[in-house]
Image: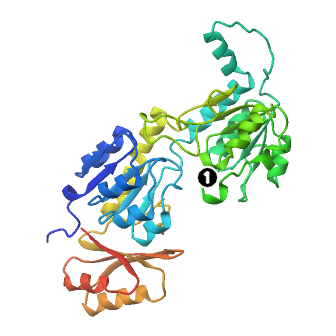
Amino acid sequence: MKSLSFPKSKIKVLLLEKLDNSAKEKFSNEGYQVESYDGSLSENELINKIKGVSILGIRSKTNLTKKVIESADRLLSVGAFCIGTNQIDLEECAKNGITVFNAPYSNTRSVVEIVLGQMINLMRSIVEKSNDMHKGIWRKDSINSFEIRNKTIGIIGYGNIGSQLSVLCESIGMKVVYYDIKDKLSIGNAIKCESLKSLLKQSDVISMHIDGKKENTNFISSNEFDLVKKGSIFINYSRGNVVDIESLIENLSNGKILGAALDVFPKEPLNNDEEFKSKLRGLKNVILSPHIGGSTKEAQKNIGSYVPDKIIDFINTGNTSNCVNFPELSLPEQIESHRLIHIHFNEPGVLLDINKIISSYDINIKGQYLKTIENIGYVITDIDREYDKSVVKELKKIRNTIRLRVLY
C-alpha cells in the first residue's frame, strides 16, 4: 500500500539567521528541500516566504507573530535554534497544530564561560586599560582592579545557565546567591535569596539569566539600581528587554555601577550589514558583544544537530518529546500499521468520538496514546494497514479538530 505520509521531497524547510551547516545537512539528508538565509526576515518578508514551508528554523532575531502563522499554509514545526522562545507566539502555533522545539541545554556551557570571562575582565578594568594601550597610553596601576575570589555573585534566574554558572563561580572561590521566582534547589553552597532586594544589596556582581517574557520587561530598572552596592558589576546575557538601558547608563555614569557587559539589547540589528545603534556605545568599562553568548562552534554544532533531530522525529513518528508548546508523547514505531495523529482543542469527549468513528469502520486499534496540556489535546492512534480511507475524512470532521495527519 502506498504511504499516506506527505512525500519527503515536497517538504520545504526555511532556515534563517545563519544556522550551523549541520542543520541544513540533517534536513537535506532526510530528503527535504532546504532554503537558507544568513540574516533574519521582517514580518512582511516572512509572510511572503513562509507560504508552502513545512519546517521553519530560526534563532532569536526572527519574530514568529500571529500574522506570520496565519500566512503559513503548510507549517508543521518550528525549530528555535537557541534556548529562548519568546520570539515565537507559542499559543498561536499550538492553535494551528504547529510544534515548536528549542535547544534548552546545547549552548549552556558557552554562555557560562563567556559570562565568567567578562566578569573577570570587568573586575580588572581590562577594557579601559586595553583601549588606553591601543592609544599608546601606559597606565600601570591597580585602580578599580579586584580579584573575584571572596566576592559575591548574585545570579538572577537559576535555570540551566544560572545554576551551571553557580557551580563554576563557587569553584573559583566566590560566594553565590541567587533569586528565582520558582522554587529551585540550590547546588553546592549557593544560597537562595527570598527577595530580589536581598540579592541586589549584597552582590558584588549581578548576572541576569531570566527569559524575555513581557512580564520581565525592565525587571531591573531605577528602583533596583538604587539598591545595589556602589562599585558593582552588572552582566546581562539573557534577553535585551529585562534591563532598563537608560537606568543602567545613568548608574554607569554616576559610578554606582563600576562596569557592565551586555550581549543582548532591546533593539538589535536584523543582520550583520545593519548598524548597531545604542547609547551604550563609547561608555567606559562597558563590554558590548553582538548576541554571541551561545555562538561557539561547539554549541552551534550541538544545536544544529539536536533541533533537526527532534523535528525529523516528529515528522516521521509524531513524537513530541521536549516540545515546548505541545503535550509530550514518545512512542515506538508500530510494524505493519498506519499512524493517525490527531491534534485538537482540549475538550471532553474527543477521544470517545475518535474511537467511535474508528470502531464504526471495523478497524482494529493496535495502540493508542493521549496526552493533554492546557488547551491542546494530542492523540496518536496506530491502526491496521488495511482500512477504509473514508475514516480520515470523518476524523477531520470531529469537533475541535485542529489537524489530522496520517503517517506511514
| The C terminus, quarter of image | bottom left
Hey, which residue is sitting farthest left in the picture?
A: 1
Q: Nearer the viewer, residue 191 or 283?
A: 283
Whole-percent x and y of residue 328?
47, 66
x 69%, y 33%: residue: 260
Q: Does residue 191 show up?
A: no
Q: Position of residue 293 (x, y in %)?
A: 55, 37
Q: Quadrant of residue 277?
A: top right
Is residue 284 shown left or right of residue 113?
A: right
Would you name the residue on which mark 1 appears? 211
Q: Is residue 174 left or right of residue 355?
A: right
300 shown above or below 1:
above
> In percent of the image, x 65 and y 50: which residue is there?
210
Rendered position, 298 above or below 5: above
Count of marks overlaid on the render: 1
- The answer to whether one can see residue 182 in this image is yes
